[in-house]
């Protein structure tokens, strides 16, 4: 009998996807020998401050462009298609039903690991997934009933800084894949209204 597939679930706004996202996904994939990483863009609040956010369709397309050469990467728009709130436990229930024999690994940063007890239904999430916490060298404390993998990984990229730079006229940001940067220019994303 073969080992179950191991699937990483990497949620976020990806507004825009940058080289840091790809780097951290690759580090986690290598550390845990994942068969694939599913990039799951979530909805963005329309009241978000700052530059105009990209639409869900635009963020999915940027993810497809950024991961086109990564055979282990999959872009999954399940949260964008859901009419109800995009709670992580609902996403994981969908993935568990879609891949019943797989080991699911939820990827998150240390700040989100700390906030996890305040998420909607964290116990249900813990029943269905293992957690890969990307740590910047800080102590990550385990929790009873949670399967935890601490992954050492960091990257200086910031989507907020990238959006700000683009809105101020930067065309080729160092932390953007050049094909993603070109697509952003063609679509005039993150430009002031």
Image (cartoon, helix red, strand yellow):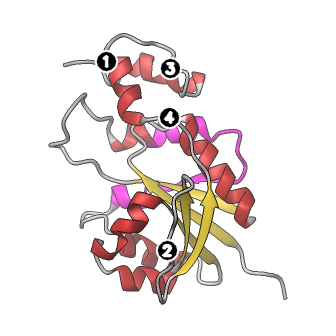
Identify which residue is drawn at 49% across, 35% down. Answer: 62
Neighbourhood count class around disc 3 (C-alpha, 10 Å): few under 14, some 14–19, many 20 upward = some
Of the numbered discs 1 and 2, the one sitting upstream in the chain is 2
Q: Indicate the secondary structure of the residue bearing disc 2.
A: loop
- When the figure is inspected, residue 65 is found, relative to residue 42, above or below; the finding is above
| Residue carrying label 1 | 167
* Magenta stretch bounds: 60-81
Nearest the eye: 42 or 25: 25
| Residue carrying label 2 | 141
Image disc number at residue 89: none
| Residue carrying label 4 | 157
Pointers 4 and 3 in contact (CB under 8 A)?
A: no
Of the numbered discs 4 and 3, the one sitting upstream in the chain is 4
Pointers 1 and 2 in contact (CB under 8 A)?
A: no
C-alpha separation, residue under disc 4 versus residue under disc 1: 17 Å
Of the numbered discs 4 and 2, the one sitting upstream in the chain is 2
Q: Nearer the viewer, mark 1 or mark 2?
A: 2
| Residue carrying label 3 | 173
Neighbourhood count class around disc 1 (C-alpha, 10 Å): few under 14, some 14–19, many 20 upward = some
Q: Indicate the secondary structure of the residue bearing disc 4.
A: loop
C-alpha separation, residue under disc 3 versus residue under disc 2: 35 Å
Q: For residue 155, which quarter of the picture?
A: top right
Q: Is 70 one of the magenta-colored residues?
A: yes
Of the numbered discs 3 and 2, the one sitting upstream in the chain is 2
């Amino acid at each position: 009998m073969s080992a179950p597939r191991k699937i990483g679930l990497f949620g976020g706004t990806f507004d825009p996807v940058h080289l840091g996202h790809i780097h951290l996904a690759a580090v986690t994939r290598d550390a845990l020998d994942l068969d694939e990483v599913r990039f799951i863009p979530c909805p963005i609040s329309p009241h978000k401050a700052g530059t105009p956010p990209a639409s869900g369709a635009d963020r999915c397309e940027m993810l497809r462009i950024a991961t086109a050469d990564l055979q282990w990467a999959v872009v999954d728009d399940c949260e964008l298609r859901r009419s109800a709130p995009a709670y992580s436990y609902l996403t994981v229930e969908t993935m568990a039903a879609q891949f019943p024999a797989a080991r699911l690994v939820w990827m998150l940063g240390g700040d989100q690991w700390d906030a996890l007890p305040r998420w909607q239904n964290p116990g249900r999430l813990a029943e269905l997934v293992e957690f890969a916490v990307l740590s910047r060298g800080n102590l990550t404390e385990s929790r009873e009933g949670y399967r935890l993998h601490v992954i050492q990984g960091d990257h200086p990229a910031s989507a907020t800084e990238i959006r700000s730079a683009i809105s101020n006229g930067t065309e080729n940001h160092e932390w953007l894949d050049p094909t993603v940067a070109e697509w952003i220019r063609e679509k005039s994303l993150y430009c002031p209204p």
